[in-house]
Image (cartoon, coloured by chain):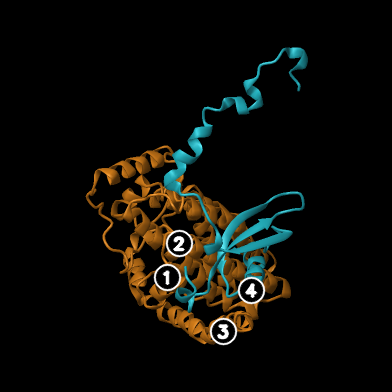
Chain colours: A orange, B cyan
Amino acid sequence: MYTQAMDTLGKEGGDAAPRPVRSAAEAALQQRFDARIDDGGFIEAKDWMPDNYRKTLVRQISQHAHSEIVGMLPEGNWITRAPTLKRKAILLAKVQDEGGHGLYLYAAAETLGTSRDEMIDALHSGKAKYSSIFNYPTLTWADVGTIGWLVDGAAIMNQVPLCRCSYAPYARAMIRICREESFHQRQGFDALLVMMRDGSDAQRAMVQDAVNRWWWPSLMMFGPPDAESTHSTQSMRWGIKRISNDDLRQKFVDAAAEQAKVLGVTLPDPELKWNEARGHHDFGAIDWAEFWNVVDGNGPCNRERLADRVKAWDDGAWVREAALAHADKQRQPMKEAA
Amino acid sequence: MSETTTRTEWPLWEVFVRSKAGLDHKHCGSLHATDAQMAIQLARDVYTRRQEGTSVWVVRSDQIIASDPGDKDMYFDPMEDKVYRHPTFYALPREVDHM
């Protein structure tokens, strides 16, 4: 997702315009903060930070966390239908990782003063967004491999620069996540490669179909073009974001174009070709109307994903309450005995 | 956070993992759990999925006392000019410089 959060603020945002500085003391703090950012230094949880820096991070980290959690749903659908025990074990481990990544990120956001309940409430009420890529359906087994190759591949490209984010707890979480995530992309490519090399014609057609459907949404994961990305400049200034949407997208296209050749699939873009002069691949125009339509809640699976998420949370309420009641009860006898 | 404000949200715990015998436990993150036993169990699931640890500590976040980042200069800068606390401060003749 990941830089997408900065461009699709949801309704919890507030304005990101810098507020006028209030006092000499605050001006001094601001100056120290700016100097530390300029030096490439890190900001820790208890350090002074501008309100908008805090707000922007809470929004970005929580939406990143939501994306990991909602991202478990499209692939989770395939755990019971994985073609072999090996693929099933791999997929279970991957989906468990996504859950873990969501937890690292929620914990990082909590260091900024928000609570887990507030964040979950924002997701469930629709105030907070998650990556729009997860609002597309996983129709066949090839979709699972393609998500690993393209969706996780795009996510990794987005996430690696976040390991150097100026907010240290986020950067530390991202280091853990990136270390674990590369298996996600490799297992996806591996699953597709097996079908392309050893599979039947029908299986190869299935892979091509999945790639056709996931290619453009994957490119949209990097967010709107730089020229239209209103919050990018401030986030770059704050060292939250290090590389622009368009630069990351280009890097991804260049890598994926080569990988597609190895795989033996065609990327669904007639304008995709190597440009010797630029040293990059040219590619066709992205349908941003589709992107905004999905962000606005009208993608193929928006309602289903959120409903599944809310249901899982509601169905688990009794477990959370029982665990608290049990912990209370364990403490109780000691009080009575005293 | 007080006991009453955590009625619905499980308390927060900090997790420390020893990656192998002989090394220190190192802070690696936090999680919510209702009690110590659950915190240890979840710490294993969340932070050691790839054998990152041989031992885990958990401690309630509200039990940690930390120095105030606002006092950082006052606290730590006095040590800045005490270079004589480092072995490199003492230039010794080459014959005995390995001491």
Q: Check if mark 1 and mark 3 are on a common chain.
A: yes
Measure how far apart labels 1 and 3 are at the Cα level.
Answer: 23 Å
Q: Which residue is mark 1?
A: A119
Q: Which residue is mark 2?
A: A109
Image depth: mark 1 or mark 3 in front: 3
**Label 2 element class:** helix
Q: Decide: is A135 above or below A187.
A: below
Q: Chain of mark 4?
A: B
Measure how far apart labels 2 and 4 are at the Cα level.
Answer: 22 Å
Determine which of the numbered discs, if any, sits on residue A325 in the image. Answer: 3
| Residue A285 visible | no
Image depth: mark 2 or mark 4 in front: 4
Residue B63: horizontal and vertical position, in percent?
55, 62
Q: Check if mark 3 and mark 4 are on a common chain.
A: no
Residue A266: horizontal and vertical position, in percent?
52, 61
Residue B83: horizontal and vertical position, in percent?
57, 26
**Label 1 element class:** helix
Q: Chain of mark 2?
A: A
* Residue occupying the far front of the picture: A338
Question: What residue appears at the point 52 percent right and 74 percent down from the top-left corner?
Answer: B10
* 10 Å crowding of disc 4: few (<14), some (14-19), many (20+): some
* Kind of residue indicated by mark 2: Ala
Residue A117: horizontal and vertical position, in percent?
44, 74
Q: Check if mark 2 and mark 4 are on a common chain.
A: no
Determine which of the numbered discs, if any, sits on residue B38 in the image. Answer: 4
Question: What residue appears at the point 45 percent right and 39 percent down from the top-left corner?
Answer: B74
Q: Earlier in the sequence, mark 1 or mark 3?
A: 1
Question: What residue appears at the point 42 percent right and 70 percent down from the top-left corner?
Answer: A119
* Kind of residue indicated by mark 3: Ala
**Are the residues tagged 2 and 1 within 8 Å (C-beta)?**
yes
* 10 Å crowding of disc 1: few (<14), some (14-19), many (20+): many
